[in-house]
Amino acid sequence: MSRSVVIIGAGPGGLAAAMLLAASGQEVTVIERSGRVGGRCSRLELGDYRFDAGPTFFLYPRIIEELFESCGFDFRNEVEMLRLDPLYRLSFMREDGAFDHLRLWSDPQQLAAAVAEFCPHDAAGLQQFMLDNRAKLAAFEPVLSRPFSRMTDFLDPQILKALRHLRPWASVDRELARYFQDPRLRLAFSFQSKYLGMSPFRCPSLFTILSFLEHEHGVWHPVGGCNAVIDVMARLAQRMGVRIELEQPVEEIVFEGRKAVGVRTAAGVQRADAVVVNADFAHAMHTLVPDALRKRWTDAKLASKRYSCSTFMLYLGIEGSVDLDHHTVLLAEKYAENLREIECGSAPPATPSVYVQNASRSDPTLAPPGHSALYVLVPVGNLERGIDWPRERARYRALVFKRLEAMGIQDLERRIRVEHIITPQEWASDHAVFRGATFNLAHSLDQMLCWRPNNRFEDLERVYLVGGGTHPGSGLPVIFEGARITARLMAEDLGFKAVAPRQATALTPRTGAALMGACE
């Protein structure tokens, strides 16, 4: 029997859940507050320039390939993907103002050569790092693909076997010290913790797998940007019968007792057998669910949790070319101090790290001929830090432009044709992100697995969660995995059969054996 499901939010998790539920025969409606699908993964159009609003590349596309397969589609036929090599260029600014540069590659021979040239005495650690993290990913992938709702879930033999790889006492940086002595090289394999909005000095050692994933399975650019993937998902979902309603903010979830029976918008009440929340978790709880109905995730409990950092964003349409790689990261000369300023400072970092995506270098669809589309991201504290962003906005913009000039971008302001800025304040007010914490709840061990909001939301009946605020966590492949978990739980509860991929499409790791030869 077909069930009716309302999904709040047309972000990547919401659309993935919509496709999976529609493929299993359910009646699905996605209600989105803005005029475009995608959420934090939507498209920003400024004149003839196109930008990703948030995520700028794909890791581990196997998950979305399997998801499409489950729904009867071939991902590679729907989306053109470019595998980037080099993955990115890292620039380490020294205190004298000069730079040390390191390009990291997917190609194992080039990766081994680049590491050996940059830091000869640490080159031998690369092979062991890859071997150990290959084993860690193999052990934890099944763990991250299943739900966690209670402590007894840890008694599963597969989970107990995986936990020996966890090393809960170690941070990402401390874990990498087993392989690399040079702190710059440890940063090269740990700055990815910023994908979770965390410091490598606090991020659990499990997440060394992020850097490993980049080298083993590649960093991928969808032609048109990550938002192009979301547009394809929306189109396919509608083909499958999903109704997507844009510019329809949900005002509240409607309950009978503790059981969700629908949602209310300006158009009235839309009843449903179940509700899936793909909105920012903490913001959604505050605005859509009365505090009295929540037991574990009350307003007081939400206020006590730790949240990720935020970001200061610049989207720049530039006349002419820019001599930067597709991805370039400028790492602050005093990186640990920079992170302390993000986590504890009452002002934004004085010498920030800066990430620049120069995607039009690889993808000419993003800017007019002879022009460039630059995406600039600076990690900063979330709104808990109390920074007055309306006052800081212009000053910090000027500081970021100085950092860009130091990276070698000349005459930048003179060449700007379009510009858009997002501060933590806009993340909160315009994009409905709690405290402007762009990466949701922090991924500390006490806020993961069963300590993170459950996919089958434990506080309410017939309410389910998808997105970075629930298990398994943030990041596109992880969010897609979370949507698969949620769809399976809904199938169990509502009495329908969940779809599954007809055939696993595991990518062939090409780095492993080749890297072993390159390091010998």
Image: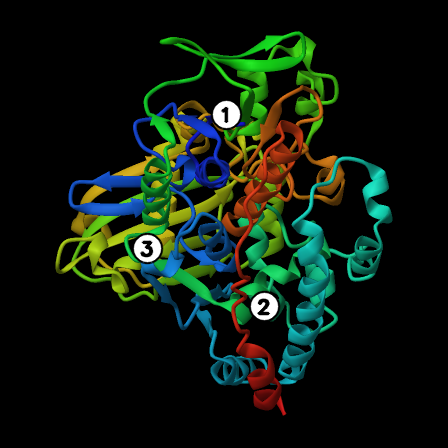
Q: Amino acid at mark 2?
A: Arg
Q: Secondary structure at mark 3?
A: helix
Residue at screen point 66% across, 84% down: 124
Where residue 233 sits in the image (x, y, percent)?
A: 37, 44
Q: Amino acid at mark 1?
A: Val
> Residue 5 has which mark?
1
Residues 373 and 346: in front is: 373
**Label 3 sits on residue:** 78
**Label 2 sits on residue:** 184
Where residue 341 sits in the image (x, y, percent)?
A: 58, 42
Residue 341: tell me if it is visible: yes
Q: Amino acid at mark 3?
A: Glu
CA distance for labels 2 and 3: 39 Å
Residues 83 and 318: in front is: 83
Going by the image, does 165 lie left or right of 395?
right
CA distance for labels 1 and 2: 49 Å
Residue at screen point 54% across, 22% down: 284
Residue 469: name its quadrant. Answer: top right
